[in-house]
Image (tube, rainbow, N blue to C red):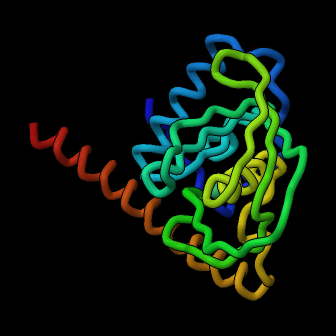
Amino acid sequence: MVREIIIWPDPILKELAKPVDRVDDSIRRLLDDMSETMYAADGVGLAAPQIAVLKRVITIDTSPRQEGQKLIHLVNPEIVKTEGETTYTEGCLSIPGEAEDVERAAKVWVRALGYDGKAFELECEGLLAIAVQHECDHLQGTLFVDHLSSLKRELIRKRMKKLKAEHAAERADEVKGAKRHERAL
Ligand SMILES: [Zn+2]
């Protein structure tokens, strides 16, 4: 099921996500919903807090932008080692239409539980390394805008508030339209 993606600023995106006790069917359903939502939005990654679920659960798929990649499920991910530095122009499904340069580690090693609940470790480079760091940030209540200057962040906040107001107005119009339609019957 495609879930609604929470748009920043929203207090839920600032919350700390809680570890998952064990990967059961409810977590697998959450992972399925998250990958479906991520693909529907044409995203590279999604963290559970972005659909208002405060659990340490992430989905990432950097294909076809990165060769040899596929869908990855990360439950309770932990970055255990980093190497080098890189700058990448990042966007976020919770901050639509915005992209800014963010400094990250060039390479990371992440430890997590997979879809089957088994522990694994993954060496990540390129876009995958960026995505892992970006999504792990979400679990700590940090967004890419938190890595920017306060001036840039406040400009983006203003644009997002305007966008949210427009969305709310559209929804109100839709409701009114539906009511008119009901009366027409
Ligand atoms: Zn994001």
Residue 14 makes an appearance in the image: no
Would residue 103 appear left or right of 115 to someone viewing this image? right
* Quarter of the figure that contains the N terminus: top left
Position of residue 8 measured from the top left corner of the image (x, y, whole percent): 64, 61
Residue 163 makes an appearance in the image: yes
Would residue 91 appear left or right of 106 to someone viewing this image? left
| Number of callouts | 0
Extreme residue toward the right, this view: 80
State the residue at coordinates (90%, 44%).
80
| Residue 184 image-quadrant placement | top left
Between residues 8 and 180, which one lies in front from this camera angle? Answer: 8
Vertical placement of residue 87 versus 33, above or below: below
Position of residue 161 measured from the top left corner of the image (x, y, whole percent): 59, 71
Position of residue 127 measured from the top left corner of the image (x, y, whole percent): 61, 59
Vertical placement of residue 126 versus 24, above or below: below
Position of residue 15 measured from the top left corner of the image (x, y, whole percent): 82, 47
* Quarter of the figure that contains the C terminus: top left
State the residue at coordinates (53%, 50%).
62
Between residues 120 and 114, which one lies in front from this camera angle? Answer: 120
Between residues 185 and 159, which one lies in front from this camera angle? Answer: 159
Extreme residue toward the bottom, this view: 151
